[in-house]
């Protein structure tokens, strides 16, 4: 009796396989959909900058559990979590340099708060953070390029004269003044965005971009001759053969200097080298 | 004798009084809203009791709590978490392993309030039809959410997870999260009874796996008093867990609801006019029916 009861209730093999396959297929389909959605949803817009110490974006999205503890521990309240409907991957932290740049706290509380190392705890010195890279994107509107004194970005930079330096150039328009051109150096710029915040224009001429957007990359085969020469301590190409001039004895030619050099005094001639002597000769005779 | 779904709990209210017939429901709402309140007190009132959200939090600057399911996804994608996160996850794991994993679902998860409302409205409006997805779909989804981080390198599920998105929405800013919440509500109301929590949610699936040896369990101690009113089946979000315990006396099945899908919500205790159910523990032997070692009947019979 108990046995037949059990048999009546048990699912037969065909039903089991059908149900299992159905579920597996729909879940599999959903997985494919989710995978594609993820690819799209994980694209970070360039103006959203990750907090200091953030792992490279693809690793970050695997490590960040979207708890928002970094947001809470930021003393300047610059961090936000992406919300559904934003361009930012849902729940992941970011800041917008123009409205709220990273103030570069020495103790880096956001990193300390991160439970998963999505913000890398090996970052101890905030000056080693690489949140992005500032780029002077608009030379037409940056007033420094017009010959006006500004230098605000240079002066607010926490690594003043290291991350941003001023390059003095001749002002060809006025002909007599200097241009104080801000130049960003990627080896020192933390991408904090204080420069972008401080830029006096309506829309900043200097902007922080994710590093992969901001940086170019030299062809891997490419070598700068002078750097290679310095490394090797000598020229790596055959030195040029010194040019031989076929000049009379006692005469040399210096291409980049004095030009023709006559070492010996030229042999005497019947005529004076001064043409006036020839012109005056007759009058002397008379 | 069987009552209409819309009248579930009516009899209990008449017999036991309104409060007794809603005791566990009220306590659960207190718990759910209290947890939410603790998290939003910081940003709203500058009263910092808890920081973070359900994914990971820090209570009173000392107690770290981390969702082991989300942490597991992160670890699958290749991350080495900080010790605080591991400690936080361990605390959560031990807690739910003792009180029942799906206590998370019925006492903590904010989506529960949404799906409970949908379920209540469904009963009141007499909406019957339901799609026939398997209740084990959630375990497949659980597996999927643990495989995808391996393939894509990202915590994929957290981009769409209604549980964390709703909670985060309330604590950190809603955005369009309400659309997702509304979708879950309408799905549960119109498409599938207990659709989200009972069939698909991989978070619940994960926590149900923690329930396997949980101590606190609902027991049908007084099961011979059952008058087949069906109220408990009508309110239970996982009605399949009740039957063996309630009706298994003849087969010698223990009255302890040992199925790990039971959320320990206690609604069956509330709505039962004849006081069949009570909270007990897995090892309690004071029940009146035949006693069997606790056996898990939640697994689909294959």
Image (tube, coloured by chain):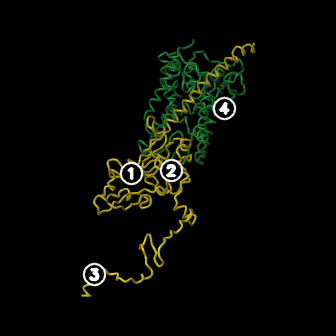
Chain colours: A yellow, B green
Q: Is label 4 in a helix, a strand or a loop?
A: helix
Q: Position of residue B295 (x, y in %)?
A: 70, 26
Labels 2 and 3 touching (C-beta < 8 A): no
Q: Which residue is mark 2?
A: A217
Q: Residue furthest front?
A: A286
Asked which quadrant contains residue B47, the reply is top left
Viewport quadrant of the C terminus of chain B: top right
Graded by Cα atoms within 10 Å as few (under 14), some (14 to 19) or many (20 or more), the crowding at tag 3 reads few
Residues marked 4 and 1, same chain: no
Labels 2 and 1 touching (C-beta < 8 A): no
Q: Is label 3 in a helix, a strand or a loop?
A: helix
Residues marked 2 and 4, same chain: no
Q: Position of residue A87 (x, y in %)?
A: 44, 38
Position of A162 with respect to A152 (left or right) is right
Q: Is label 1 in a helix, a strand or a loop?
A: strand
Instruction: Work out whether mark 2 precedes mark 1 in sequence or the reverse, and give the earlier one.
Output: 1
Graded by Cα atoms within 10 Å as few (under 14), some (14 to 19) or many (20 or more), the crowding at tag 2 reads few
Q: Is label 2 in a helix, a strand or a loop?
A: loop
Asked which quadrant contains residue A12, the reply is top right
Q: Residue furthest bottom?
A: A285
Asked whether the viewer can see residue A93, the reply is yes
Q: Which residue is mark 1?
A: A206
What is the spatial separation of the Cα atoms under label 3 and label 1, in whole angstroms? 73 Å
Front residue of this view, candidates A184 and B296: A184
Residue A11 is marked as none
Position of A161 with respect to B104 (left or right) is left
Q: Which residue is mark 3?
A: A279
What is the spatial separation of the Cα atoms under label 4 and label 1, in whole angstroms? 58 Å
What is the spatial separation of the Cα atoms under label 2 and label 3, in whole angstroms? 72 Å
């Amino acid at each position: 009796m108990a046995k037949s009861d059990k048999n009546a209730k048990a699912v037969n093999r065909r039903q089991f396989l059908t149900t299992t396959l159905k579920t597996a297929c729909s879940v599999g389909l959903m997985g494919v959909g989710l995978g594609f959605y993820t690819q799209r949803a994980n694209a970070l817009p360039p103006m959203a900058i990750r907090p200091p110490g953030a792992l490279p974006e693809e690793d970050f999205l695997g490590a960040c559990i979207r708890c928002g503890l970094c947001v809470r521990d930021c003393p300047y309240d610059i961090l936000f979590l992406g919300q559904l409907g934003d361009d930012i991957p849902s729940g992941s932290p970011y800041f917008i340099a123009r409205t709220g740049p990273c103030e570069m706290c020495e103790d880096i509380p956001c990193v300390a708060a991160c439970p998963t190392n999505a913000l890398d705890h090996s970052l101890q010195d905030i000056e080693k953070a690489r949140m992005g890279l500032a780029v002077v994107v608009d030379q037409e509107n940056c007033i420094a390029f017009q010959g006006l004194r500004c230098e605000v970005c240079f002066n607010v930079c926490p690594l003043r004269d290291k991350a941003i330096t001023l390059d003095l150039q001749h002002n060809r328009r006025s002909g007599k003044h200097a241009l104080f051109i801000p130049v960003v150096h990627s080896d020192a710029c933390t991408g904090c965005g204080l420069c972008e915040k401080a830029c006096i224009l309506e829309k900043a001429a200097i902007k922080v971009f994710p590093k992969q957007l901001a940086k170019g990359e030299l062809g891997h085969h490419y070598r700068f001759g002078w750097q290679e020469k310095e490394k090797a301590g000598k020229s790596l190409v055959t030195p040029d053969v010194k040019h031989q001039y076929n000049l009379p004895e006692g005469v040399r030619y210096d291409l980049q200097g004095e030009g023709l050099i006559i070492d010996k005094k030229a042999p005497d001639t019947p005529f004076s080298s001064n043409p006036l002597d020839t012109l005056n000769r007759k009058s002397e005779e008379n | 004798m069987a009552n209409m779904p819309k009248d579930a709990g009516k009899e209990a209210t008449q017999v036991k009084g309104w409060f007794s017939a809603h005791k566990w429901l009220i306590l659960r709402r207190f718990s759910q809203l209290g947890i939410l309140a603790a998290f939003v007190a910081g940003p709203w009132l500058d009263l910092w009791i808890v920081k973070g959200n359900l994914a990971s939090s820090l209570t009173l600057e000392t107690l770290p709590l981390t969702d082991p399911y989300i942490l597991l996804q992160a670890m699958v994608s290749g991350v080495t978490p900080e010790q605080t996160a591991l400690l936080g996850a361990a605390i959560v794991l031990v807690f739910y392993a003792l009180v029942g994993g799906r206590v998370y679902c019925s006492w903590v998860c904010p989506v529960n309030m949404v799906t409970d409302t949908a379920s209540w409205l469904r009963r009141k409006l007499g909406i019957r039809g339901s799609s026939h997805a398997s209740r084990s779909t959630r375990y497949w989804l659980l597996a999927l959410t643990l495989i995808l981080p391996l393939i894509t390198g990202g915590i994929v599920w957290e981009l769409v997870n209604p549980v964390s998105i709703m909670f985060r929405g309330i604590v950190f800013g809603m955005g369009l999260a309400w659309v997702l919440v509304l979708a879950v509500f309408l799905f549960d109301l119109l498409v599938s009874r207990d659709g989200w929590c009972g069939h698909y949610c991989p978070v619940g699936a994960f926590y149900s796996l923690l329930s396997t040896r949980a101590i606190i369990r609902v027991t049908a101690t007084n099961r011979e008093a059952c008058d087949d009113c069906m109220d408990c089946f009508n309110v239970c979000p996982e009605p399949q867990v009740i039957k063996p315990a309630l009706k298994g006396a003849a087969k010698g099945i223990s009255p302890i609801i040992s199925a790990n899908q039971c959320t320990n919500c206690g609604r069956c205790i509330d709505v039962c006019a004849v006081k069949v159910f009570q909270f007990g523990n897995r090892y309690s032997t004071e029940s009146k029916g035949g006693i069997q070692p606790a056996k898990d009947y939640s697994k689909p019979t294959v």
